[in-house]
Image (cartoon, helix red, strand yellow):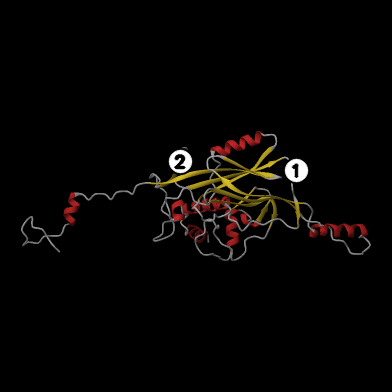
Amino acid sequence: MKRLIALALLAIGLPTAAAAQNDSTLAVYRVELILVEHSGASDARAADEPLDFRANPDPLSARAQAEAARRMREGLPRLPGSLVAEPETDDPPRHWLENADESIAPAPLLWTAPDAPSSAMAAAWQRLQRAADFSPLAWTGWYQTAPRGRAGRAQRVHDQVVVQRLSSIEPGRALLHPNLSFVPELWLPGMPAVLDSLFGPRSPDSVIYRIDGEAGFRQRQFLHLDLNLVWQEPTAAPFSDAPAPTMGLPDATDAQIAAAGDRAQEPAWQLHRLRDSRSVRHGRYEYFDGSRFGVLAYITRFEQKFAAPKPEPAAAPEAAAAAAPDPGPDTPAGAQQYH
């Protein structure tokens, strides 16, 4: 089963930036976000249930699946005509990203999170930790291109505090992460158990986070970053979790019945929204402020670089002579042959 899943994961070939876009001239952007808690009043509103952003692809989850696919690939043999990539070699990378300050080789997968924060965001995190009124909560990011005039693919952005767990993987859901999936949906019996063994007891898509939402990076005349995030906290236990009144039996007082009815009518969640969309520039910090929390963004632009194709090895003189046609016994030496 694991081998079958590995082949399915690798059917996409884990495309790099060029393979995923078919346009090697496009710049690649690394989008990084830090979720920041700050002091101050909030414009929270009540809601019966939390907002659900599970439909948005999560670059952190995509990176985890890509790493799992690589680990599984290392233990698979090379099959004739298979989808398993050739083993990595010590040859110089043939595709990488580069700007004046940084080089990333080989080129990372689009729509997956970087392995670690950039130096700029690591420094920002440390400064926020020392600040009196701010507290950094989570970091995320991803790589993407931004073709002019094309809508970006909004990515899921969240912290690591789970506030609600939902049902596990259901039959028919895509096996591959949306950021990596270039094949039709695949469902096999027993797949949830196998995925749980690879990625933990629950899929990353089966939970609601305290800070949850989506962020999209796109280019019109200028670069734009669109944020739609929420800080959501339960304010009351669900009615089903409260002690059930006995509805008139001697051990249920009128006060208990009234309290249970009040709990049933109370909104179960308090939501603090942060929605903003504005132009941004790469190479500088951009802060999006909300009443309960904020987002610090940093965009880095890279050019795609490709190694020159390897030249065909020149044939040795002996090999060239051996490959030449036999002139035949009746042909004078040095005569040109026509065919």
> Can the viewer see residue 110 in this picture?
yes
Q: In the displayed image of the protein, which residue is found farthest to the right?
A: 250
- Badge 2 is on which residue? 99
Which amino acid type is marked by label 2? Answer: Asn
Residue 75 in the image: state x and y as whole percent: 47, 53
Q: Which mark is residue 189?
A: none
Q: Mark 1: which secondary structure?
A: loop
Q: Is residue 319 above or below residue 329?
A: above
Which amino acid type is marked by label 1? Answer: Ala
Of marks 1 and 2, which one's residue comes earlier in the chain? 1
Quarter of the picture holding the C terminus: bottom left
Q: Is residue 246 above or below residue 21?
A: below
Pointers 1 and 2 in contact (C-beta within 8 Å): no
Q: Residue at x 34, y 47 (%)?
A: 308
Q: Mark 2: which secondary structure?
A: loop
- Badge 1 is on which residue? 41
Q: CA distance from mark 1 to mark 2?
A: 41 Å
Q: Residue at x 57, y 59 (%)?
A: 194
* Relative side of 309 to 194, left or right: left
Residue 150 in the image: state x and y as whole percent: 51, 56
Q: Nearer the viewer, residue 209 or 219?
A: 219
